Structure formats: structure tokens, C-alpha cells
Image (tube, rainbow, N blue to C red):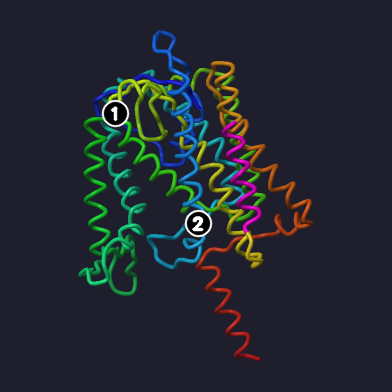
Amino acid sequence: MSEAEPAPASAPEAVAAAVLDALNATDSNGTEALNATAKFVATPEGTALAYGSLVFMALLPIFFGALRSVTCSKSKNASDMPETITSRDAARFPIIASCTLFGLYLFFKVFSQEYINLLLSVYFFVLGVLALSHTMSPLMSAIFPASFPNKQYQLLFTQGSGESKEEIVNYEFDTKNLVCLVISSVVGVWYLFKKHWIANNLFGLAFALNGVELLHLNNVSTGCILLGGLFVYDVFWVFGTNVMVTVAKSFEAPIKLVFPQDLLEKGLEASNFAMLGLGDIVIPGIFIALLLRFDVSLKKNSRTYFYSSFLAYIFGLGLTIFVMHTFKHAQPALLYLVPACVGFPVIVALLKGELTEMFRYEETSPEEAETKDDSSDSEKKDQ
């Protein structure tokens, strides 16, 4: 998390890694230090408004993304299927993220920053439009009346023919999805040409919510491995080298939420931003979403672990802001978020005597669940 950054450039800029890699590789976790040449000094009111807005925006995708992840885990629609992170993936991720980060660092050292960002802008534009469209889809379904002529469409790509035919893409959508796509494209064009902070935040919130909804940890142990590894990754690259700072300053992309500290003075044209990287939202968020699904699996009609981890996130993020504001130096937010988000639910589980049950919880994909159901039905028929 960083206290301030200069105004975004107007040239089209984007990022080159996959969504989750980009969230951690370029960002995000408080890597951009204060601009030493900046003469702007934020007022206490402006600072409080900026920090409060960032905290509020960070909570939105975690809360709603976690709720949507419960539905997503039961979905059989190919477009809504979650991506499950295993313990092996979690162990390798900090290494992959570090290689990606250092690779981007070398790229910006060797090649022209302008040409790299120009090439990557198309990728990030498409990704942002799709993410925002997917985020808006449930809202549009609620807004449109039942009498709305909602036609169904299917985008199907296959390879081969006859019995060897294999599906490459099978995407089903409707008229409401097309409306979402048009609206998202307008926001995308706005961001592409203006780099306005509101458009940046719309894309950033969409990325974060989609990440929390669609990236699933298969169990609590995997979550601890992932958060522990990225804890070390974050601290090393922020405090140990200048690599992350250099990469973060090299381009502008919607991989962070920003809010102007001079909004009260300059209005929507404000240009001195406080920022929070999406990695500081998505990484703890997918762990919090896992705990919500664990709450649901207990069938006790309570959300104890979800709310305890959610409050822990608020505490950790508040502590990050306090330390950063006190010492006037950018902070790796995962340094404070990881112990809070893991420690609080573990303490609650110890007090309730459910620690073993928590770590034994194993989430299955919809295909695995269907296979188990079919096996159970076959056994019952045999009996």
C-alpha cells in the first residue's frame, strides 16, 4: 500500500501477466514510495477521506465476492466454474510471482516502456471489459423486467470432426450479458484514453470481485501455504530490493484501487492518490471466501469464521494504514493482513473446539461432487 502517487499518464498502459500474477507481481502491496519531488501535502480531512474510501472499496469485493463464491462452487455452468488452487499450486505461486516480477523488471530496463505498455494495453482492455461484464451480470438480471425479451446464445468452437471432435470453447450467454458487455466496453474506452481514476477503480473492483469469486482454495491448509508464501514474497521484494518499486512505477494499470487525497480541493480532477493494490484484496479475500464456504458446510446457520476473518481483515488493513501514516513509508500490507486473517479464525476454532474439523474440510469441485453423487446412486441401486 502506498500513500501517494502522481497523476496517471494519458497514454494507453496495461499489464502483461495473468490476472493473479499481475496482482502480486507489479503492484500493489504497497510498493510505490512517496514521490520525493511532490510538494503536495494532504489535509487531515483529505487523508481521512482517501484512506476511509480505500478501506470501504477493499471490503466490497471481499464481502460480495465471498457470497458469490458459495453459489459459484455449486455452479455447473462452464463460464462460472471456479479455478481451484491446490497445495502444490500454492507452494509454487510465490516462486512464479517472483520470476514474473523480476522478468517485468528486466523488460522495463531493456525495452522502451512506451512500446511495451502500448502492446499490453489491448490485453488489459479486453480482460477488464470481460471482468466488469461478469461482475454486472447479476445486477442486470435483477434490474431487467421479466417481460424483457432475453434471447439465449451459444459460442461454440470445436476441434476435429466426428467422434474425435473436441470442444475448445463452449460459452453460453443471453441478451442481458450483451448489454453488460456494451456498458463495460464504454468504461473500457474511457479508461483506455483518459486513465481516469474512477474508470480505474471500476475495473479494479471488477478484477478483485472476480478473483475472490472464481479463485477457490481447496482447503484451509492450502490457504495457509499460499498466504505464508506470499507473506515472505511481499516482505522480501518490498524491503529487500527496489525491484517491485521500479516495476510499479513503470506503468499504470487497473491493478490497484486509488483515491485522491486532494478531492476536496480539486474535485474529480484531483491527481494525488492514495492507493491499495488488488493483491492485498484478492489474496486474503480468497481465504475469507473459503471460510465462508466452510461455515456453510457446517450447516449450523452461522457465519462465525467468515465474520471473524472479515473483521480481522479490517483490523489488519487499519494497522497497515496506521503504520504507513506514522512512519511515512509505503508498507507491504500482507505483512499485517496475513497474521490477522489466519490468526483470528484459528483462535476462534480453538475456542470452539473445531480446529481439527476446520483443517479437515476439503472442498470438491462441481464435477467431483456430481461424480460422488452418481457413485452413491449406483451403490444404492446395486444394494
Question: Mostly what secondary structure, the magenta segment?
Answer: helix
In the image, is residue 2 above or below residue 225?
above
Foreground of the two, 43 or 358: 43
The stretch drawn in magenta includes residue 311? yes
Pointers 1 and 2 in contact (C-beta within 8 Å): no
Q: Residues within 10 Å of mark 1 (few under 14, many from 20)?
A: few
Residue 166 horizontal side relative to residue 94, left or right: left
Foreground of the two, 77 or 311: 311
Rendering quarter of residue 95 = top right
Residue 219: image location, x then y, percent:
63, 54
Q: Which residues are magenta?
A: 303-318
Describe the element under mark 2 as helix, strand or loop.
Answer: helix
The residue located at (58%, 31%) in the rendering is 233
The stretch drawn in magenta includes residue 327? no
Location of mark 2 (residue): 67
Q: Amino acid at mark 2?
A: Leu
Location of mark 1 (residue): 268
Rendering quarter of residue 378 = bottom right
Residue 154: image location, x then y, percent:
26, 66
In the image, is residue 92 above or below residue 79?
above
Describe the element under mark 1 as helix, strand or loop.
Answer: helix
Q: Amino acid at mark 1?
A: Leu
Residue 96: image location, x then y, percent:
52, 37
Q: Residues within 10 Å of mark 2 (few under 14, many from 20)?
A: some
